[in-house]
């Protein structure tokens, strides 16, 4: 079913592209390499259990939580908006 200016299947393609972008972002944010003993932000010791649970960890839990909040807040807009989504 066509609606407005979009062709059939355009909405699903937009959804698929958004999901694919989100998966790429999360995979790129996964830590790699050796875990640090001390947080690279506040220099507090990273607990052994965290280093074992998350290989390649670079930050303590409070610093990582704050970093995640900042990244989430900066990405809350529709980058792939089209005329149809603006008219609704």
Image (cartoon, rainbow, N blue to C red):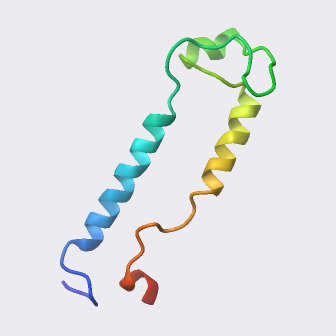
Residue 32 visible at all: yes
The image position of residue 88, as x and y in percent, is 44, 88
Q: Where is residue 28 drawn, in percent x and y?
A: 46, 35
Residue appearing at x 51%, y 35% in the figure: 29
Residue drawn at x 43%, y 90% is 87
Q: Position of residue 44 (x, y in %)?
A: 81, 18
Q: Position of residue 35 (x, y in %)?
A: 60, 13
**Depth check: 37 or 8 in front?**
37
Name the residue nearer the viewer: 30 or 12. 30
Q: Residue furthest front?
A: 40
Q: Quadrant of residue 47?
A: top right
Above-or-below relation of 30 to 79: above
Q: Looking at the image, how many numbered discs can be counted on the residues?
A: 0
**Left or right side of 2 for 14:** right
Quarter holding the N terminus? bottom left
Left or right? Give the position of 30 relative to 45: left
Q: Quadrant of residue 46?
A: top right
Q: Is residue 17 above or below residue 12?
A: above
Q: Left of 53 or right of it: where is 11?
A: left
Q: Residue at x 50, y 30 (%)?
A: 30
Q: Residue at x 49, y 21 (%)?
A: 32
> From what the image shows, is residue 7 above or below residue 52?
below
Q: Is residue 88 visible?
A: no
């Amino acid at each position: 079913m066509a609606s407005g200016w979009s062709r059939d299947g355009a909405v699903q393609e937009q959804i698929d592209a958004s999901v694919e972008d989100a998966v790429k972002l999360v995979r790129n944010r996964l830590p790699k390499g050796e875990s640090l003993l001390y947080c690279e932000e506040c220099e507090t010791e990273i607990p052994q259990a965290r280093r074992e649970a998350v290989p390649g960890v670079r930050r303590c839990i409070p610093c990582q939580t704050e970093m995640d909040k900042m990244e989430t807040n900066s990405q809350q807009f529709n980058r792939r908006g089209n005329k149809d989504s603006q008219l609704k």
